[in-house]
Image (cartoon, rainbow, N blue to C red):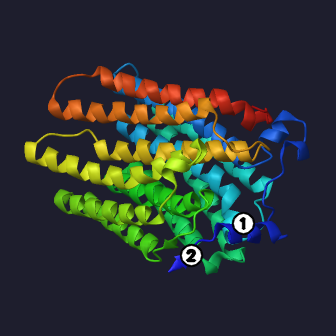
Amino acid sequence: MIYINTFAVKQRYDNTKKVPLMINSASDTSKSKTNYFLSQPHQPFFLFGVIWAIIDMLIFALAYKGILTLHISPLEFHSYSLIFIVFTQFFIGFLFTTFPRFCQSNTIAPTSYKRIFYLFQAGALLYLIGALSSGLIASLGKTVLLIALGFSVQQFYHIYKTGTMSHNTSDPFWILTGFWFGLGASFLFWIDTFTGFFGTLAVKTAFNNYLLFVAFAVAQRMVPFFSHVMVAKNPLLIKTVFWLFLLKTAVAAAELTWVEIVIDLLLGIVMLKEFLHWKLPIFNSPSILWVLHLALFWLPAGLILGALGEIAALLTQTHLALMQTHLLAIGFMTTILIGFGTRVTLGHSGQPPNADRFATNLFWFIQVVLIIRFFYSVQYAAGWEMTWLFDLSFTTWLILFTLWAWRYGPVLYRGKKL
């Protein structure tokens, strides 16, 4: 069994001279707004991840409703932009800050993460312009984003290889493995632009083996740590989840729906059993922590509810409009990224990482976005023609990220105190 002793871990981080516990606060940086904004890796990636979450969702919604004409499929634009422009930037912003600590390696040089940041924005802008005007320009944007992700994976690999703790724990290895799959999925998207053969495999690999797996690998390490609990973790958990997600991708690409349902149920049960075993203080935690607990349990819940919904859809010969995908993408991914993002934003700006009423209400609002999207799937399957739920769904998404940017954008950009 592997034991987590958060006090011992914290002491080990505090006592090492190689990696500082906290990156320099605003008082240690230049007074220049530009310099402060780029002084810590999470700041530019978080802020522009939020900005692109607003822009890309708005473009997709207008295209899906027929108001805008895109030169690529609206669904491809939706999936690719959220995976490799929005969620990936949140991943990188968080892990460029924390991955060196996981591995006990040197912090990332500003020149390295700035180069990657600029490449992501250039690729995102080219992809957006191409979606609106030319498939060739969109493919150029994919190329730049592939290069940006490649540099990111190279940076993670360097941290892993040079860290003093990399090989004493499996977590950095599995996080790095997830990013390799993300890079492979990005390459499949790029190849699909010219062949049209790999679209389904690219989406499934990117979502299951990259987004979900990396978020799970980080969450199963950080949520117990943040919660100050000592638990006996199943040493086979992360390996089991990895292989089940890989199998899920394979059978989904082969359209073996009933087999995928069984795998989803098995994945959900394995995770739920382990999370309950941790005995997280769900009802006795501050808001900045219980939102992470909520997000964690949305992972098995989304898998199980999605599998049950798919059974009902097969028996009634209906379609649920990607219900499981959105339960996981909003319930688990968005909730945990907003939770981690808020905590890191406050903690690395020299402020106590406590959620006030605004942040707490924002956490609840994510669940409202999820519920609306869930009922959109239900009405789609039932044929109720309540298309206004789609409008309400994407509108609440836009409100969520606009409110987060309005509240925490100034903290990220210039270190404003709340």
Alpha-carbon neighbours of circle 1 within 10 Å: few (<14), some, or many (≥20)? Answer: few
In the picture provided, is 280 more to the left or to the right than 403?
left
The residue shown at (18%, 35%) is 381
Quadrant (top left, top right, bottom left, bottom right) of the C terminus: top right
Q: Quadrant of residue 370?
A: top left
Local packing at callout 2 (Cα closer than 10 Å; few below 14, some 14-19, many 20+) is few
Q: For this rendering, which residue is in front, 163 or 370? A: 370
Q: Which residue is drawn at 33% across and 60% down?
A: 268
Residue identified by numbered label 1: 10
Q: In this rendering, is residue 401 above or below 95?
A: above
Query: In the image, is 132 to the left or to the right of 119?
Result: left
Q: Nearer the viewer, residue 129 or 161?
A: 161
First in residue order: circle 2 vs circle 1: 2
Where residue 353 appears, x then y in whole percent? 69, 44
What residue type is disc 1 on? Lys
> What x and y, as percent, mark residue 177?
51, 68
Quick check: can you spot residue 142? no
Left or right: residue 408 versus residue 311 is right
Of residue 345 and residue 357, the one placed in the foreground of this image is 357
Number of labels in the image equals 2
For residue 319, side relative to residue 52 (left or right):
left
Give the x, y percent position of residue 300.
36, 56
Element on which disc 2 rests: strand
Query: Please, what secondary structure does the residue beneath circle 1 have?
Result: helix
Find disc 2 in the rendering and name its residue.
3
Q: What residue type is labelled 2?
A: Tyr
Residue at 41%, 66% (x, y): give it: 274
Q: Position of residue 385 (x, y in %)?
A: 20, 22
Q: How far apart are marks 2 and 1 (CA)?
A: 14 Å
Instruction: Give the residue at x 74% y 35%.
Output: 411
